Image: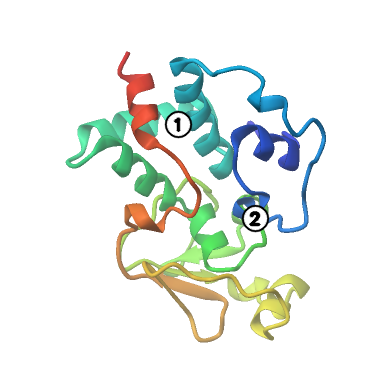
Amino acid sequence: MAKNMQPIAKRCRALGISPAVMGYSNKNSNRNPNGNSRRKKSEYCLQLNEKQKVKFVYGIMEKQFRAYYDKAAKAEGKTGTVLLTLIEKRLDNVVFRLGLAATRREARQLVNHSHFTVNGKKVNIPSYIVKVGDVIEVKEKSCSTTRFKSIADGETKAIVTPKWLEKAENLLGGKVIANPEREDIDFPVEEHLIVELYSK
């Protein structure tokens, strides 16, 4: 499986997003602070930047991202909005949004290692798309690990849960109570530029 191993702080600065979006509140890069403002960006460059931004935040490679776009283009509603909300429903993102992982990268690894169940069944596919009514929980055998015990005991930093998810009382899971909406996307992105890029 391909992995995106680009340096977080450097890549965030290049794409114009905060490392906090990625779950890295203590990362920063002051190297060459004016590097991106030396020349005016072309229309294509702006469109490509928005696509790269979404791919980087969610840790998605090009082939899979294109598949999401094709699916969004066939669905009802604005293609850009459908694309973002579809990607937001990935299992690894839901794990991160529920505060069960510090970053999306960690969430992806935890899902790969079979630490979670969806509706009682083990799911180890980070790209699994959740549906309204799905219940995501830490697998019983994994609850005793140091990582999840600290979450259950309230020792880890609390992450604000979006309104489309409902956190479990024991803090080790949650339920999808609605589909995410455009305002639930927690980083600046002009999705219409992505649509324009793929529409050429």
In this view of the protein, which residue sits in the foreground, 110 or 4? 4
Q: Circle 2 is placed at which residue position?
A: 20
Q: Residue at x 49, y 70 (%)?
A: 161
Disc sitting over residue 121 in the figure: none
Side (left or right) of 95 relative to 24: left
The image position of residue 79, as x and y in percent, is 27, 36
In this view of the protein, which residue sits in the foreground, 128 or 25? 25
Q: Residue at x 60, y 58 (%)?
A: 114
Query: How far, Cα to Cα, is label 1 from label 2?
Result: 23 Å
Disc sitting over residue 65 in the figure: 1
The image position of residue 128, as x and y in percent, is 44, 49
The image position of residue 10, as x and y in percent, is 74, 36
Q: Residue at x 59, y 70 (%)?
A: 159
Give the quarter of the figure containing the N terminus: top right
Q: Which residue reaches farthest right?
A: 31
Q: Amino acid at mark 2?
A: Ala
Give above or below for 195 relative to 101. Answer: above
Identify the secondary structure beneath mark 1. Answer: helix
Give above or below for 15 relative to 157. Answer: above
Q: Residues within 10 Å of mark 1 (few under 14, many from 20)?
A: some
